[in-house]
Image (cartoon, rainbow, N blue to C red):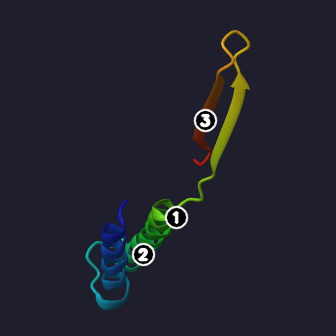
Amino acid sequence: MRIGSSIFLIALGAILAFAIQADVISIVDINLVGYILMAVGVLGLVASLLLAAPRRQNRVSESRSLVDPATGETITRRETRDTGL
């Protein structure tokens, strides 16, 4: 669920909970449906904001230098990796 659909559910739930005073079907309470839609919209909004937040990433760099005993050359190896999620 994205931010836009969450806001839509919150607005639709508020309209059903506070603006409509009709008794459509005696089994279904429109006010309760509105409160449920607002709660689902708020949960979706919180979840989408948490998932869209930037995460902390750690970058690890290693460098190793060795001398080849046969040729006498210096060999350097560099490795970089991310440890973030």
Q: Identify residue for label 3.
A: 78
Query: In this image, 29 relative to 39: left or right?
Result: left
Secondary structure beneath label 2? helix
The residue labelled by disc 1 is 50
- Asked which secondary structure carries label 1, the reply is helix
Name the residue at 30% across, 77% down. 12
Vertical placement of 13 versus 61: above or below? Answer: below
Alpha carbon distance from label 2 to label 3: 53 Å
Image coordinates for residue 36, horizontal then vertical, percent: 44, 70
SS category of the residue bearing label 3: strand
Kind of residue sitting beneath label 2: Met
Query: Residue 58, how many percent across, how many down?
Result: 63, 52
Q: Quadrant of residue 34?
A: bottom left
Q: Residue at x 31, y 84 (%)?
A: 15
Packing grade of label 1 (10 A; few <14, some 14-19, many >=20) is few
Q: Residue 1's image quarter?
A: bottom left
Which residue position is annotated with label 2? 38
Q: State how far apart marks 3 and 1 are (Cα).
A: 35 Å
